[in-house]
Amino acid sequence: MNQFVTYETAWCPGCGNFPILNSLKTALEELGKQPHEVLMVAGIGQAAKTPQYLSANSYCGLHGRALPAAVAAKMANEKLTVIVNSGDGDSYGEGGNHFIHNIRRNVNITHFVHNNQIYGLTKGQASPTSKEGHVTQVQTDGNKNAPLNPILLAIAAGAGFVARASSGDQKQLISIMKEAINYPGYAFVDILQPCVSFNKINTYGYYKNAVNPVGEDHNPADKLEAIKIAMELGDKIPTGIIYREEKEEFHRKNFLLKDGIPLIEQETPKEVLTQLIQSFI
Amino acid sequence: MYNILIGGAAGQGIDTTVAILEKLLKRSGYYIYTTRDFMSRVRGGHNFSLLRFGTEEITSHSYVLDGIIALDGETIELHLNQLTQKGFVLCDSGLKNTKEDSRIIKLDMNQMARNIGNAKVSGSIAVGAILKLFGEPLTYVEEVMKSIMKSEVLDVNIKAIQAGFESVEKRFDHLEGGFNDYMLISGSKAVGLGAVAGGLKFYSAYPMSPSTTVLEYLASVGNQAGVVVEQAEDEIAAINMAIGASFAGAKAMTGTSGGGFCLKVEALGLSGIAEIPLVAIDVQRPGPATGLPTRTEQSDLKFVISASQGEFPRMVIALRNHEDSFYQTIRALNLAEKYQIPVILLSDQYLGDTTACVKPYDVSDIKLIQPAKEVEGEYLRYKLTEDGISPRLIPGVTKNLVAADSDEHDERGWITESAEVRNQMMQKRMKKLEGLMEELIEPEFIGDESGKTLLLGWGSTYGPIKEAVSILNKKEGGGYGALIFGDIYPLPQEKLKKLTPNKKVINIEQNATGQLASLIREQTGITCHDSILKYDGRQIAGEEIVSKILEGGLM
């Protein structure tokens, strides 16, 4: 039985990370993944502790730097199922540049952003997705910066799989997670999540009212429609697979990786080195 | 030994002319040593290459010229005073030049090129003239040009060389050398080749002068050599990618110059605490900040030995020449794997861009260190061991689960704040230094061991210091020796302690503060008595060291 085990966490009771962790465990099990086939990658933050709490391979690197490590691990060994779990600060703030460019790179990994619209680990400062006017101990007069719209950004930058889920709806979350993990390319899921300790605005109650799954009539292949949905961020926040497009993934375009033989299993013939040396004579 | 300068504006084809001349002269048996003095611009300015060739090993550039190929008037203005009495200047007769000098040979190369039928072959006309001036035959022209030129322009260029050859008279005699079978390679390409030989599978970098040659060389051979080369969105991505690839089992390396290295510093510590093998090369240029982008300096030593917060074991190897560039890159990849540490290679623009002859690299004896395949019993990624080295398994290759963490962690790789475990893990990591100390390579000694003057250097000043010691000992009948460091951190101390007593010790460095001298003083208490420091972005030449020492004026 391909059981993934979860371990005791350091999260606050009631944290929105628990349903995300449990959904991920279920998604992986239902997909029939084995723990040793899965590499969980994270940066630093509360969400970034996720790899610590699930029995899989784990890489907790630097704040903001999960994506570069994750895509390179996938380049080294395509057989690994590589999943990034990190927060909104990690993914959109410190790691914003990597977010944009790994959409362009389109390596077959999955990126789950635990978006609680606040910095949790550092105890409650504004994040790139905090609402304007959100008062914190740093943004004492209220947050003056407009929040980033990660869904709109991802579609605009050319991501092939863009979804939003909520930690309050595990059934939908598990389903989206499975689709994302199976998507052959960079799959991005922004997961709305309350922070019970530091975000008194975007609470469980808030999300319960706001979350609005896209209907079955939504065609995720329709980019203009997807952009329209992405721009709906009022009282109702659309969730579901907002945009989906089949795109050629990084490995299939790379000369060395296109045939599916993991880089770490490839042997370079010895005579290549001799030929290279000879080319300088 | 002969020395010529090819100078002009960026975009005038200096590189192509030099590349053809280097190959022809090596084919003829000469040892080649070409340095590049380029400005940071794509068009215009004043650029030049110094091509030195002879029948013995050459390790330094020289500013005393036998010939100048001037592609513009400024080249003559700036360099005529370096020309020997027997020397010549070769230039186009259309060149605007205020100086009148009997040594100037004017050829109407542009008109000749048009007559041959291609205005772009004037460089080849100059090559032909140079061959004749140095008493070279045309024997190898066809063979060499075939290896460089596209077939559609081959004939016209060969014709141009012949025309140039016939338009001047011989000035110097051909000298018989035995270096036809040697390689001709730049320091940065040698690093790339060494990386391939060392089993490299993954290279990620962000373009930055003067390190870009390593990136471009690996990209040019990557498909053939099985190396995935990825241009990252920034240097932070570049190093984190290399660490991620290494964690997943691909030997990985990243490269940059000082400014890019600054951005990589946090991740260097990640490699240290997560014990993920990494090789990072810093091809130094003058700083701080943007500094002099295309020029040379050795001012990152103290930076890279202490870069990143916290304490962790690391190794720093300074590349001294074109042998080191190859063999030490292989060794760096092996040491990184063996000790699961970051290994930093220090090169610089001078070494990286200088092309030199080198004995074909011997790859018969290369042994690559690989991570473990599997372990018996319970797997602990950060198991406490006698030598501090824990079994590194590759995730997905083993059924065991592999963890890496930038937080302090226990033997399983799980976060901990236990004081006891913290101490154990710090001690375990630092313990690896003891093993590393055992395999340090002592600095190379050159010259007269009984001499009263000992020169100290590191990295790329190896060649110029070597030439200086040879000149000094010839002139003075001995008395001069030099110790030149390759392995520089941890600092090997045996030869230092043995050879410095009762000598006048002079450090020679391409920086303003004497960073090697300072490191030596800190680690051993040995002080240098004098120093030769240069930080104008131009490499010190052997002859400059000699005159500084003999004529005084030391700092």
Image (tube, coloured by chain):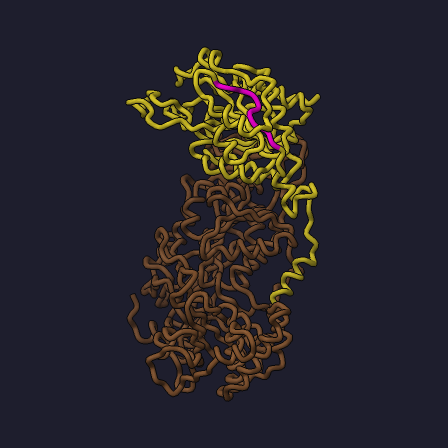
Chain colours: A yellow, B brown
Q: Of helix, strand and loop, which mostly describes the magenta segment? A: strand
Total tally of numbered discs in the picture? 0
Above or below, B194 relative to A127: below
Question: Residue B237 at what x, y percent from top left?
Answer: 49, 42
Q: Is residue A238 magenta?
A: yes
Q: Nearer the viewer, residue B84 or B455?
A: B84
Question: Residue B549 at what x, y percent from top left?
Answer: 34, 72
Q: Nearer the viewer, residue B358 or B458?
A: B358
Asked which quadrant contains residue A94, the reply is top left
Above or below, B186 relative to A85: below
**Residue B44 shown left or right of residue B28 in the figure:** left
Above or below, B333 relative to A103: below
Residue pictured at 65% horizontal, 31% vertical: A37
Question: Residue A110 at what x, y percent from top left?
Answer: 58, 30
Q: Nearer the viewer, residue B378 or B540?
A: B540
Screen quadrant of the N terminus of chain A: top right
Asked which quadrant contains residue A186, the reply is top right
Residue pictured at 55% horizontal, 23% vertical: A53
Q: Which residues are magenta?
A: A237-245
Q: Is residue A89 magenta?
A: no
Screen quadrant of the C terminus of chain A: bottom right
Question: Residue A203 at what x, y percent from top left?
Answer: 44, 14
Report whether residue A112 is seen: no
Report whether residue B355 is seen: yes
